[in-house]
Amino acid sequence: MKLADAAGEVAANAAAVRRQITEVCREAGRSPNSVTLVAVCKTFDATTVRLGLAAGLADFGENRVQEAQAKIPQVGGGRWHLVGRLQRNKARAATQLFSLIHSVDSVRLARRLEAVRDDRPCGVLIQINLTGAQAQGGIEPAELLHLASVLDRETNLTLRGLMTIGPMGADAAASRACFRRLRELRDSLRVSLPNQPIAELSMGMTDDLDAALMEGATIVRVGRAIFGTRSPTPGP
């Protein structure tokens, strides 16, 4: 595809997703301005991501630290989110690259991030597994208060909220139930840890975007609806 054609496609896709967000938020009685759209660009090259920047996208999501290390300097802009699992040996690089890490899922990882952040501000979300699918990652809901308390008492990381992945292939009702549960957990945690800015709900992707927005998503992670079908995942 020619670059001009690709630019037009990305711009049109981004505009369509923004319209979808606006329409669903209005139906839910929310302001569209309360939602951050993160364009997930894993496996897409820097040229494609720059088309997203040109289309007015500001936030981009990566799944792998090593891919982001190569891509972010080439893109030369945007705010970057780590939306995939983080290995502890990549923690230092993650604190250097990303404005928000969505996938903190253990006390050991939290402590590692604190140890390597070198006084850099580091915003994090706790990932919770609400589907029982091990491949999705995340802690069990029963572990949330303990991990959040460690973050609050033992680190200077900023706990900005929670993240989850919805059930794959589920109908709207099942998706909404999952996302509603995350909102309830967030609201309860805000009472337990009132000194932390626990506001964000990172939930909803291309296929379950509407359900997430109806249940209060403040960050949505959309890739395919913006950039199209992904290329094969590159090697390390």
Image (spheres, rainbow, N blue to C red):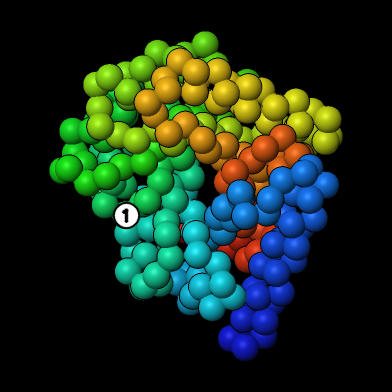
The residue beneath circle 1 is: 97
User: Does residue 96 sit above or below 56 in this rendering?
Assistant: above
Identify the amino acid type marked 1. Answer: Leu
In the foreground, 104 or 63: 104
Structural crowding at the residue carrying mark 1, measured as other residues with C-alpha within 10 Å and reported as few (<14), some (14–19) or many (≥20): some
Left or right of 213 on screen, residue 154? left
Seen in the image, is 182 located left or right of residue 212?
left
Pinpoint residue 194: horizontal percent, then vertical percent. 42, 23
x 49%, y 23%: residue: 190
Nearer to the camera, 219 or 192: 192
Q: Position of residue 114 (x, y in %)?
A: 23, 33
Determine whether 225 is above or below 24 in the image: below
Q: Nearer the viewer, residue 81 or 23?
A: 23
In terms of depth relative to the viewer, which is nearer, 181 or 132? Answer: 181
Res. 155 in view: yes
Where does residue 5 sit, x and y in percent of width and height? 67, 85
Residue closest to the far left: 118
- Where is residue 158, by image quadrant? top left
When asked about the image quadrant of residue 180, the answer is top right
